[in-house]
Image: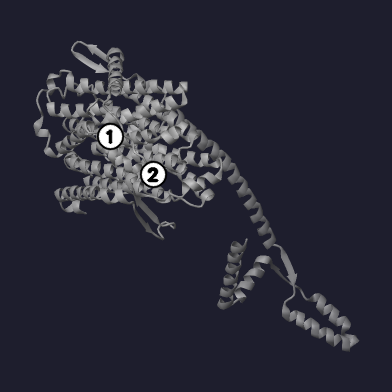
């Protein structure tokens, strides 16, 4: 409504609102660090609205409002040439409120409700352009969101049926009593959350939705909305299931698949936002690995908890920076294919520096925030290898390092193609296209990345308070800048450079004279959505339609038989004499008894009385007409009363 009167006032209003929200949440840190804040409002959704803000949830809420505030500032400039801006901001703010609701919910039904609201509001952001690609991406996103939501809901139904509660704080004790069915329940819940987390093989919406959405929405999708799924998985695995070894092992394996497959597919892409989308899928793999290690390490799980939560924070920051940086390029060129924008950033030192900051953070170069969280996750993996002496953990470390190398390779592909290669048509700074409003969020995020990289223990201090959620009290003192940690980081960089030179430059980059372009051989690979999901769903639909049609036809036949029987019965003729003639018969019979002479005439008279013929329908109709309105009402009331009593007592 504000936007219809004044768009500039609407923009200012949204910036002020998100800024005030960020300020309030920041101020809440001290009281929350002392005692969790809880709020219960009865009679909402039948079970009441139960919200809780402890340090664990506070971390998710704070990073959400921080990134949202910056992307709101960015949106006021980015969307200036877009249509339907009022609609965008309305659903942008609704998505924010529902996302915060997810992180605050202490009751799983509340969490599910906010989760579904977020799915539908973010869908509007994805299809904002309303072109064919956006609608196709939105269809995939919405289909996966609804399917995942239904699976999640089934898990919650079963969980409540067996435990009689959905309060997160009560479930760890309750779920121990339900036996092996807990694996089915937790599996369904994890699948439901796994869709939003981009977990293989439920990730098919992710590489389509990120490029389709406007860049600020892409930054939110990658930096924050993926974390809602991660939050659900972390709550289910680490809190409710208390790190069950079987569930944790499955999550760990899926994490490694995510990190490697996401990195591999990112190498082949040519659209920057699509590369960053697969990068997010890979980075979710690191977080899933950390969640798995929380359960596997048992009493030594502190390092895995720190690494997981730290990486959740870092990913939101550096991926937000990279998406917003890509958005600046799109605002100027309206294209993000590295074949088309090759060399654009060569003479733009500020944009190049900020983009390079984000790249160094993702890679985990010492001095940038990604180094701290990746170091902790690597330490957790080494801890598991040391405890179990299992050869599979050696394989896991190889996959970890190789995936880190793939991260270096696909980010080098972007940086060298856009910011290093020469292209004379992009000579100049294009300063008139860039305003301070889009620069402020990028500069802020770059500063936070460097600050955390230099002082990694500042975040460790905040995470200390989240240990209580996982049953720990003692914190962890970590030494980040050791020789071994720096070596591990540089090893990943060396592997990544080797992959880039030996594979990307040699096989994916084609050169003809001064022209160069990249190819994507993965376009002909197996497409999970088109080659598996769609055919399977079509088969299930057709098969179930055939079965249900047969059942439906059988029911209809039975109904027809019953109906025809009732019709035949209603047409049966019943012969009877009316009440008056029956009266005459009785009187004449008495008279004949007194006079035997008339007996013969009486018999002939009775014989000649022709009975009236009625059918059942006619009798019922006559009965209905004979009832007055009061009797009719009493009859209906009695019928309804009988039905209600039968329902209640049977």
Relative image position of residue 415 (x, y in whole percent): 22, 23
Does residue 598 sit above or below 257 in this rendering? below
Q: Which mark is residue 17?
A: none
Which quadrant does the C terminus fall into?
bottom right
* Scheme of colours in the image: one colour
For mark 1, does the 10 Å Cα neighbourhood hold few (<14), some (14 to 19), or many (20 or more) residues? Answer: many
Taking 550 as reference, is 321 above or below it? above
Label 2: how many Cα within 10 Å (few below 14, some 14–19, many 20+): some
Question: Badge 1 is on which residue?
Answer: 314
The quadrant holding residue 341 is top left
The residue most toward the right is: 596
Whether residue 89 can be seen here: yes
Q: Position of residue 450 (x, y in %)?
A: 20, 32
The quarter in which the N terminus is drawn is: bottom left
Element type at marker 1? helix
* Residue 218 in sight from this viewpoint: no
User: Which label sits on residue 469?
Assistant: 2
Which is more toward the observer, 552 or 313?
313
Residue lying at the far top of the rendered structure? 513
If you read the primary sequence from the N terminus, does the residue marked by circle 2 or circle 1 appear first? 1
In this orientation, which residue lies closer to the viewer: 268 or 638? 268
Q: Position of residue 171 (x, y in %)?
A: 47, 47
Extreme residue toward the bottom, this view: 594
Please say if 403 is above or below 534: above
Left or right placement of residue 443 versus residue 386 in this view:
left
Task: Identify the secondary structure beneath mark 2.
Answer: helix
Left or right: 29 with respect to 286? left
Which label sits in the foreground, 2 or 1?
A: 2
């Amino acid at each position: 409504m504000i936007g219809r009167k004044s768009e500039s006032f609407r923009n200012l209003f949204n910036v002020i609102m998100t800024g005030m929200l960020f300020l309030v949440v920041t101020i809440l840190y001290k009281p929350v660090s002392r005692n969790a804040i809880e709020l219960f409002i009865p009679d909402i959704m039948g079970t009441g609205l139960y919200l809780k803000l402890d340090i664990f949830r506070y971390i998710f809420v704070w990073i959400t409002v921080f990134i949202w505030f910056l992307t709101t500032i960015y949106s006021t400039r980015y969307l200036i040439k877009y249509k339907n801006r009022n609609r965008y901001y309305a659903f942008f703010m609704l998505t924010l409120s529902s996302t915060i609701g997810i992180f605050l919910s202490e009751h799983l039904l509340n969490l599910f409700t906010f989760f579904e609201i977020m799915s539908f509001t973010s869908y509007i952001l994805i299809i904002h352009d309303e072109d064919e690609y956006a609608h196709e991406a939105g269809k995939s996103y919405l289909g996966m969101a609804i399917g995942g939501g239904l699976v999640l809901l089934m898990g919650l139904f079963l969980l409540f049926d067996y435990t009689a509660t959905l309060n997160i704080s009560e479930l760890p004790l309750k779920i121990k009593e339900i036996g092996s069915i807990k694996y089915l329940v937790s599996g369904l819940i994890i699948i439901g959350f796994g869709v939003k987390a981009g977990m293989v093989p439920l990730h098919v919406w992710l590489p389509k939705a990120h490029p389709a959405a406007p860049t600020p929405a892409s930054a939110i999708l990658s930096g924050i909305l993926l974390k809602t799924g991660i939050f659900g998985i972390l709550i289910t695995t680490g809190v409710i299931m208390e790190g069950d070894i079987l569930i944790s092992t499955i999550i760990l394996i899926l994490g490694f698949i995510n990190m490697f497959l996401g990195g591999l597919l990112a190498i082949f892409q040519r659209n920057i936002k699509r590369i960053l989308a697969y990068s997010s899928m890979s980075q979710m793999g690191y977080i899933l690995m950390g969640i798995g290690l929380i359960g596997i390490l048992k009493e030594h799980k502190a390092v895995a908890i720190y690494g997981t939560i730290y990486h959740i924070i870092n990913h939101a920051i550096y991926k937000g920076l990279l998406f917003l940086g890509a958005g600046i390029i799109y605002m100027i060129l309206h294209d993000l294919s590295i074949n088309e924008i090759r060399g654009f950033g060569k003479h733009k030192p500020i944009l190049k520096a900020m983009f390079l900051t984000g790249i160094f953070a993702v890679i985990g170069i010492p001095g940038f925030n990604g180094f701290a969280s990746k170091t902790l996750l690597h330490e957790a993996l080494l801890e598991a290898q040391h405890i179990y002496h299992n050869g599979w953990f050696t394989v896991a470390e190889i996959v970890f390092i190789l995936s880190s190398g793939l991260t270096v390779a696909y980010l080098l592909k972007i940086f060298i193609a856009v910011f290093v290669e020469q292209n004379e048509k992009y000579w100049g700074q294009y300063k008139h296209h860039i305003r301070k409003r889009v620069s402020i969020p990028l500069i802020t995020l770059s500063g936070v990345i460097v600050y955390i990289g230099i002082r990694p223990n500042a975040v460790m201090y905040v995470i200390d308070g989240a240990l209580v959620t996982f049953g720990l009290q003692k914190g962890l003192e970590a030494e980040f800048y050791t020789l071994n940690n720096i070596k591990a980081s540089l090893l990943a960089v060396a592997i990544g450079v080797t992959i880039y030179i030996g594979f990307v430059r040699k096989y994916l980059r084609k050169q003809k004279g001064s022209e160069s372009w990249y190819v994507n051989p993965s376009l002909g690979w197996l497409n999970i959505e088109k080659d598996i999901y769609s055919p399977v769903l079509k088969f299930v639909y057709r098969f179930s339609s055939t079965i249900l049609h047969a059942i439906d036809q059988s029911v209809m036949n039975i109904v027809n038989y019953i109906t025809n029987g009732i019709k035949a019965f209603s047409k049966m003729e019943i012969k009877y004499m009316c009440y008056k003639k029956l009266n005459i018969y009785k009187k004449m019979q008495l008279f004949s008894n007194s006079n035997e002479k008339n007996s013969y005439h009486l018999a002939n008279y009775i014989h000649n009385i022709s009975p009236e013929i009625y059918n059942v329908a006619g009798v019922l109709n006559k009965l209905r007409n004979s009832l007055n309105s009061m009797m009719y009402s009493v009859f209906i009331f009695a019928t309804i009363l009988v039905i209600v009593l039968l329902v209640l007592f049977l």
